[in-house]
Image (cartoon, coloured by chain):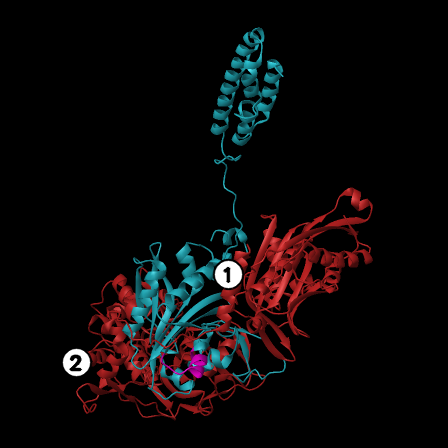
Amino acid sequence: MHDISSLRTQFQSDLQGAATSDALEQVRLRYLGRESGELTKILRSLKDLSEDERRRIGPQAQALKKEIEEALETKRTQISAAPLWEVDLSAPGRKPSRGHLHPLTLAQREINRIFRDMNFSVVESSEVESEHYNFDALNFAPGHPARDVQDTFFLEQPERDKKDPRTNMLLRTQVTAMQILHLERQKPPFQIIYPGRTFRNEASDSGHESNFYQIETMVVGKDTTFRNFRFILETFLKKFLGEGVEFRYRASYFPFTEPSVEVDVKYRGKWFEILGAGMVHQSVFMNAGYKKGEWQGFAFGAGLDRLTMIKYDIPDVRLFYSGDLRLIRQF
Amino acid sequence: MKFSYALLKQLIPKAPPLKKIAEEFNARSFEIEEFEGDMLDVKIYSNRYSDAASHLGIARETSAIFGLALKDPRASSKKLPKQKGLVKIKIEDKDACIRYSARVFDIPKVAESPAWMQKILRTCGINPINGIVDVMNYVMLEIGQPLHAFDAGKLANRNGVTQMSVRMAKKGEKLNTLDSQTIPLDPDMLVIADSEKPLALAGIKGGLESGVTTATTRIIVEAANFGSRGVFRTSRRLNLRTDAGVRFEHGLSPELVEWGMERATSMLTELGARLIDWDEAYPKKATDRIIGFDTETYENLIGAPVTPARAKTIFGKLGFVVESRGGKSAHSMKIKVPSWRPDLGDTEDLVEEVARIEGYNTFSPEAPMFAIAPAYPDDFVEIKDAVRDVLVAFGLDEVYNGTFLGPVDLEEGKGLMPLFQEWQAVKVANPLSEERSLLRPSLSHLLRRTVIDNGRFFEKIKCFEVGKVFAMQKGVIRERLALGIAIAAKRDAGVILEAKGIVEALLREFGVKDFSLEERQDVLHVSAGAKKLGTIVLALTGKHFIGAFAELDLEELIRLRQSQKVFKVLPRFPSVTRDLSLLIDASMRVGTLMEEIRKTNPKLLESFELVDEYSDSQLKSQGKRSLTFRFVFQALTHTLSEEDVNAQMKKITNTLAQMGVQVR
């Protein structure tokens, strides 16, 4: 019971095993606890010992008490200085896994948002279209070179009459068929934007692919003017390509608009044609079953790929359809 | 189309430098694609060939834009000599040939044309040939009317009369052209012929035998107007594009015939030629049109005003005549539009003429007034956005593949399953190449390529595509909106379980009820109730890469989607979780096991999931593997007792024991 040295040894082993401040407190109580601490009991029992024993054990016990207190203090400091968690905060953060939307989707969504904010509806139509809706209903005269300008992919249909434009199917060369389709299904006034994949029979190069995307808008009302068109277009260009975007209008010709213009945008110091536009030709309204002069409006159509290339500084349109994840993961 | 600045300057003496012309042309009339030295390349729009595919037309535009005087090159009609009957014209097809004019000249010795003319010809991409042919081409460049000269001595004549017919070719007839090609003719092609044989392909190219050479002493000059559709058709059939053909196929006005012929006569006469005889056939004369123009209509369409005086000035400069007994009010007028502007038909055309000369860049923007009627919803747009967001959140990357593929791609992707039943691939009638001769029947075929191509850079590929797929069914072309998902990794067939999990999570996210992914012959068939939604298959793609390809019908998903989420009451009482580790035969299927457990229908079982699969060499050698399931019991009205749960677990373990499954 009064074996101070074995008590010391016991204490040292207990101390080593104490890793937290709670465990350390347990150790302190075991030895120095007011009620049942081992050393406390010894010190309390000194008065019951003989004077010789008291003179021998007393100072030893006092010395051990001091040792224990100092050792506990040192360990306490060590434990509180140790980091709270076992982790190296300077190590690189763990990357969360995320997927990426295709840059054309990102551009399309931004454009849709810009137009939805102006109360435009986003609508879509089919990629396979009849010659009637792609050309004839849009005032392209049959057998005329204007149709040549858009090199068309025709589809083989052994059982259909190829001479009838309503059953001669092709891959749409423009999304413009939507002008007629929408006029047939919703009465004006309305504002719509209709994006979609379109197809031209051209050899691919850095600026051209045989399939690509167009976005077209159409605004129809009782007194929609050319100046209104400039407002809507310029609002869009500034929001999409930045406030400082430089643009210019040029006289042009399309069978389905009158007057017709083309718009160029300055990119890297050069003018690039980005869209065609104009006031909707009254033939389009009449072909959709409306009376001549009842409504008027404007439409403009741009190549989404080209706009996206300008916005993100991407040099080759073919990258969009390459499926290269190294491109897509950048966005 | 190439033009010469030197010739333009002849017509507009005060013409500004080429650079300035290019700038203003771009804004107000035509696109100048390039200009260098004497040459400017102008893109003439397809409805403006009649008036503008000529230096006269370009000069007219320049005059209107810059307000400069135009030196009109057109010669006035001189009195013609009495007809001698040396040449007789017969138009056999009045729709194919609207006007035909022929003049006979005796010419001095054919020499080279002067240097200034040769230079202009060359700038415009035409080779000088000889003094006569060059005049023909020069007049075409200047006036816009193609001309042709025949060697009169080479034409058949009977009793001194040369019969020139404009007719469809006869089967078997041939023509040797000026550049030594032999063209087989057929009844669909219009030719100029004498009484024996075809002399020229009308409006396109002249024949070799009747061409003018240095030995020619008498010529017959042709100025004619041919219908655009016929010339277009023949030119494309023979793949023969000429300066003359390109002009006719866009539609020229027959009035140009007169201008061209008079100018040619004037120039030939200056060279010493003598007009001997002539003939002309012009069965249906073209007329000028009267079109109304109203400044109020203009302002209504453009949004900016124009004064009647300004409008009149612009029309005058463009060569239109403002009728003196014009419109009903101060702001309306009647414009006599010349026949050589066949592109102008209605009042909007005139609005365009005024607006473009004023300049589109000058009109300031003005915000329109829109009704706040709600926007029109489009299902396809919405579902595509929803699917994209969900899949990107799951960590997949979006790709866009092309629409075209080839028979080889279909062959290589034989195990892949398009959405269509009993289908054939849609063929492109005029494809770019064999590899792009079909429309894709599924997204999986090209997603397979995506996996192969990206395999060089990534160990694990998770991607998707939303797009249209096509097939022919019973002679009808079908188009469908589809979703394709590809999960691929090296040597890990587990990718199909990953794809399975993604599809299940997507369907759950969309609130689709009663969906199932059933296994049939190594393919997972996805359906909801009776509706087929698609499939998931495994395929080997390139070296060691295994890909799982899911193909889903998004149009079907639109119908099944419940986007409205419903709140489920939160449980007030604690749940009880029990884990069960099982030892099963390696050959036993997890799906079967789970189905059997489900069938025991334990009461108050909220869920049970497979939380672990384990196998090691020891277990493998015993033909076993270990699975751990987690069962969660929940009552809504009371706290579950141990006995309740134990009883249910006993039901489960009994069933498992019957299947020979050990609990560990």
Q: Residues within 10 Å of mark 1 (few under 14, many from 20)?
A: some
Residue bearing the label numbered 2: B309
Residue bearing the label numbered 1: B389
Quadrant in the rendering for residue B292: bottom left
Determine the CA span between mark 1 and mark 2: 59 Å
Image coordinates of residue A169 in percent, x first then y, are 55, 78
- Would you say residue B278 is visible in this rendering? yes
Quadrant in the rendering for residue B650: bottom right
Query: Which region is colored magenta?
Result: A179-189
Quarter of the picture containing the N terminus of chain A is top right
Q: Nearest the camera: B165 or B34?
A: B34
Q: Amino acid at mark 1?
A: Asp
Residue A116 in the figure: left or right of residue B650: left
Q: Amino acid at mark 2?
A: Ala
Question: Both on one chain, marks 1 and 2?
Answer: yes
Q: Is residue B134 magenta?
A: no
As drawn, B596 above or below B458: below
Q: Read off the chain for label 2.
A: B
Q: Colour of chain B?
A: red
Q: Are marks 1 and 2 in contact (CB under 8 Å)?
A: no
As drawn, B105 above or below B109: below
Which lettered chain is shown in cyan?
A
Q: Read off the chain for label 1.
A: B
